Image (tube, coloured by chain):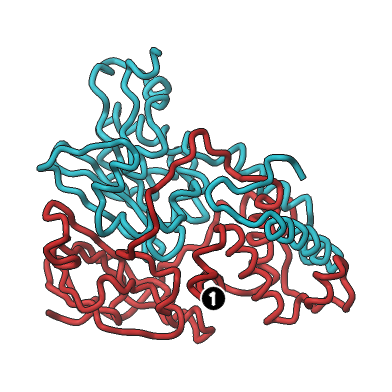
Chain colours: A red, B cyan
Amino acid sequence: MNGGQDLGGTHGHGPVKPEPNEPVFHGEWEKRAFALTLAMGMPGGWNIDMSRFARENRPPGEYLSMTYYQIWFAALETMLKERGLVAEDEIAAGHSLHAPKPVKRTLSPGDVAKTLHRGGPTERDTNTAAVFKPGDKVRAKNINPPTHTRLPRYVRGHVGTIERVVGCHVFPDSNATGAGENPEWLYTVRFDGRELWGSQGDPTSKVSVDAWEPYLEPA
Amino acid sequence: MSDHDHDHHHEHDHSELSETQLRVRALETVLTEKGYVDPAALDLLIETYEKKVGPRNGARVVAKAWVDPTYRARLLKDATPAIAEIGYAGRQGEHIVALENTPKLHNMVVCTLCSCYPWPVLGLPPVWYKSAPYRSRAVSDPRSVLADFGFTLPKDTEVRIWDSTAEIRYLVLPMRPEGTEGWGEEKLADLVTRDSMIGTGLPKSPEDIAK
């Protein structure tokens, strides 16, 4: 979606302000919001692409005025409510008011370390051959789906070079809508700064994105 | 809740943040009562990323690459198994690529679309990494971003920005500081900063840590 999350090349956000000796979390609520988000992945049954869409799918002004853990928490609430796992009256009351829906699995303390260590690899086997090879010139397609995509606006329509064939990976545009993983070939595509930003681009800069085959066409 | 329960980077109406705090607490109670989460598992998740997984992990990887040329070669060829050799793997680091800085090439990592970051080697991302100023300008004006960090690159050094748009996570392998000949891995790891592994800073020099 062309939402507030797609920030590459936008202006007016001011300087980057690194915080000296920044703590991992700013306050107790960030810790709990973070942990709840990770722990609910298993019983919630959603995937990472659905989570990302739930985070970005809000008015841009709202997205930009929230802290990152506020965005995470808001997305968690959305996904829980969409699936009927929690209702607003329960959050308002601070207690469970309705019978729990059956869930497949929950995260036990004994499973935390191995679950984190396993992670969620996205590479998949395939019988198809990659269409592009390193050195090929490709154009990022001009696509504008209102649903989740990982092709940022700033590269759409621009010509780059295939730098690396990464492998066949879960396709987020499909996975985010529940239409299945539909793995596609993934490439690292390199663009010149001047190709992306015109005469205002830094001639010494190059930018790459990781782009799935459906995002690309021969150039 | 402690007095530190405020956000340092966004100025928010205090009541709005208090409402978030209350809702987080309420939701945790609801999810616990329903049997969906176990608070002991939540504590362990927090402890893992507060105490165990952080940039010290990445610093050990970098220091090993600085002293061991065969390890460096393995890391640059296929970083995921090379990093797993030292015991770091998993969530948000399932597919890692290491990027070698040279006198002619400086690498810098961003996620313009969200907050993708190599957790097993760097821990959770700092606020600035997830914020609009960094995500907007890293790709269009990287040298001005480096200037925000007080860092100037030579004019003829190529700046290469890696936008983490898929599940590939990037770790910058910075150049080894001068004056560290004969140093062991542990001592070298003390020079490796988090920002030097994102590409927004340089490792410390021997003089920096002597201070």
User: From this viewpoint, is residue B168 visible?
Assistant: no
What is the crowding at mark 1: few (fewer than 14 residues within 10 Å), some, or many (at least 20)? some
Subunit of label 1: A
User: Among all residues in the image, which is located at the extreme front?
Assistant: B13
| Image location of residue B209, percent across then percent down | 39, 18
Is disc 1 placed on a helix, strand or loop?
Answer: loop
Quarter of image, res A171: bottom left
- The residue beneath circle 1 is A58
User: From this viewpoint, is residue B80 visible?
Assistant: yes
Out of B71 and B153, give the one closest to the viewer: B153
Out of A94 and A173, give the one closest to the viewer: A94
Point 25% across, 16% down: residue: B179
Reply above or below: B90 against A120: above
Quarter of image, res A75: bottom right
Q: Quadrant of the N terminus of chain B?
A: top right
Point 20% across, 49% down: residue: B159
| Image location of residue B77, percent across then percent down | 26, 48
| Image location of residue B131, percent across then percent down | 45, 55
Point 88% across, 67% down: residue: A95
Out of A77 and A37, give the one closest to the viewer: A77
* Callout 1 amino acid: Arg
Point 25% across, 61% down: residue: A208
